[in-house]
């Protein structure tokens, strides 16, 4: 298995044959975005929808090359992990501003799919799953919060045998069924957004065009191998592939490896046993199991190392063994495809957005910590606010301090492993274990 292998479930089932040229000229724009993942393309589309049409996106490989094209495709509630971790930084008013937008991501996705007629296999139905009484209390609290934000949606707390009505695993004792959330084919979603951005709004995207050097000033200049972009504003949206190009941002995230897989197509009776609602699911522990039933009757299952940071030698075998803890009746079902790669994490597991200290026209978004499909839609709007007149959410999120991750360049495996162990211990305190 080769990490960043282009053969993933998403690449072999993509429905949009989009290819954009590399940059071979010196051009100008109002905004230049570095990174063609969900954050970059979402923000470009958000700006275009607001009338900012002179936007250029530079992607070093192809659209969706990073985490945006190999994640679980889960459409979930929330923006980041454990809001209580940032409460002291943003205060009660800031926390309320963030909470008010924390469950709008799914509606943004559904509205854009409809608006731009995107074929992305969206399916309603999500289950947040727990194993014990501590997690049951957490899920009950989430149920009250999510229901207050979306009173018109079916959001139900379940216990005991009722859990089996949504997921066919005896491992779980409690669940929160959220029928406003669900799953989506993320690469087709991303490509559908890109097509709308270029075809309808005249946006410009360049693939296979890595940024080599960036000069800050009243005008920002991004130099590439064959050209350059001069712009009024820039957005760093590189995710795990920043590669030290912006030192201030590089210091405050660390890459952790996550893995995903799909089974061979399953008969309908097994699909019904796995999930009668054909849903997407994750437990609420710090290192989650996440899985869903795809449009082609496959089980997509993903996770990463529970305590130690490492890349398994046999990824299919590793993921199959993990999957059988949840669904032992799938012991004879083969994994068709497995893949993986880095995702960038922050110390508080909350995304970082804002502007650089000495350059207020240099914007950034990073550190989704494995939780980026839905939040990237919300954060794109917050960034667009920051680029114009601001908002309460922008003020709150951009004020959160970014702590440096020490030792990441020389001792990444050790730092990640220690971080995982610390998170597992702390999870008892917050009702996540």
Image (cartoon, grey):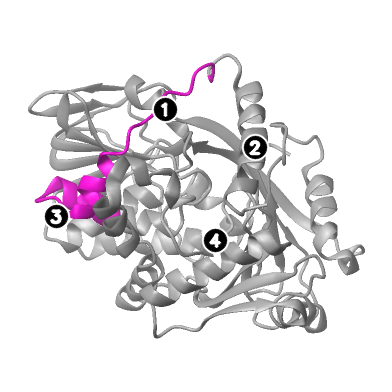
Distance from disc 1 to disc 2, alpha carbons, whole Å, reads 23 Å
On screen, 158 above or below 108?
below
On screen, 274 above or below 128?
below
- Relative image position of residue 140 (x, y in whole percent): 56, 70
Residue on which the image places disc 4: 73
Using residue 155 as the reference point, say whether residue 313 is left or right of it: right
- Considering only order in the chain, which callout, 3 or 2, is on the residue closer to the N terminus? 2
What element does badge 4 sit on? loop
Residue on which the image places disc 1: 252
Labels 1, 4: front one: 1
Distance from disc 2 to disc 3, alpha carbons, whole Å, reads 36 Å
- Relative image position of residue 125 (x, y in whole percent): 56, 77
Q: Which residue is at 49% across, 18% downward?
A: 406
- Considering only order in the chain, which callout, 4 or 1, is on the residue closer to the N terminus? 4
Task: Work out which residue is located at the far top of the displayed protein and give it.
Answer: 410
Q: Quadrant of the N terminus?
A: top right
On screen, 176 above or below 1?
below
Label 3 neighbour load within 10 Å: few <14, some 14-19, many 20+: many
Q: Is residue 407 magenta?
A: yes
Q: Which residue is at 92% across, 64% downward?
A: 332
Using residue 107 as the reference point, say whether residue 405 is left or right of it: right
- Relative image position of residue 340 (x, y in whole percent): 64, 43
Labels 3, 4: front one: 4
Label 1 neighbour load within 10 Å: few <14, some 14-19, many 20+: many
What element does badge 2 sit on? loop
Labels 2, 4: front one: 4
- Considering only order in the chain, which callout, 2 or 1, is on the residue closer to the N terminus? 2
Residue on which the image places disc 3: 53
């Amino acid at each position: 298995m080769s990490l960043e292998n282009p053969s993933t479930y998403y690449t072999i089932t993509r429905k949009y044959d989009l290819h954009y040229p590399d940059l071979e000229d010196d051009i100008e724009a109002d905004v230049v975005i570095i990174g063609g993942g969900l954050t970059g393309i979402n923000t470009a589309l958000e700006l275009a929808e607001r009338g900012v049409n002179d936007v250029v996106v530079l992607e070093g490989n192809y659209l969706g090359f990073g985490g945006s094209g190999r994640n679980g495709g889960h459409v979930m509630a929330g923006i980041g992990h454990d809001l209580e971790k940032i409460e002291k930084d943003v205060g009660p008013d800031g926390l309320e501003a963030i909470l008010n937008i924390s469950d709008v991501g799914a509606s943004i996705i559904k509205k854009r799919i409809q608006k731009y007629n995107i074929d992305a296999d969206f399916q309603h139905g999500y289950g947040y799953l727990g194993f014990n009484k501590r997690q049951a209390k957490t899920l009950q609290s989430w149920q009250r919060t999510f229901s207050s934000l979306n009173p018109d949606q079916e959001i139900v707390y379940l216990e005991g045998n009722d859990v089996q009505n949504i997921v066919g695993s005896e491992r779980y004792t409690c669940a929160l069924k959220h029928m406003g959330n669900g799953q989506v084919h993320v690469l087709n979603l991303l490509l559908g957004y890109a097509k709308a951005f270029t075809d309808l709004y005249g946006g410009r995207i360049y693939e296979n065009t890595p940024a080599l050097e960036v000069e800050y000033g009243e005008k920002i200049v991004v130099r590439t191998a064959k050209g350059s972009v001069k712009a009024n504003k820039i957005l760093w949206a590189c995710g795990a592939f920043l590669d030290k190009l912006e030192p201030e941002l590089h210091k405050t995230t660390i890459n952790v490896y996550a893995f995903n897989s799909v089974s061979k197509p399953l008969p309908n009776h097994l699909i019904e046993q796995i999930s009668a609602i054909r849903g997407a699911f994750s437990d609420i522990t710090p290192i989650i199991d996440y899985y869903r039933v795809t449009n082609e009757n496959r089980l997509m299952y993903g996770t990463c190392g529970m305590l130690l940071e490492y890349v398994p030698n046999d990824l299919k075998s590793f993921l199959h063994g993990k999957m059988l803890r949840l669904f032992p009746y799938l012991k004879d079902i083969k994994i068709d495809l497995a893949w993986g790669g880095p995702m960038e994490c922050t110390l508080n597991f909350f995304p970082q957005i804002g502007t650089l200290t000495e350059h207020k026209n240099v914007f950034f978004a990073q550190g989704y910590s494995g939780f980026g499909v839905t939040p990237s839609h919300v954060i794109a709007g917050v960034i667009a606010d920051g680029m114009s007149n601001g908002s309460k959410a922008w003020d709150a999120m951009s004020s959160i301090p970014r702590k440096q991750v020490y030792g990441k360049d020389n001792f990444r495996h050790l730092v990640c492993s220690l971080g995982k162990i610390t998170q597992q211990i702390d999870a008892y305190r917050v009702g996540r274990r």
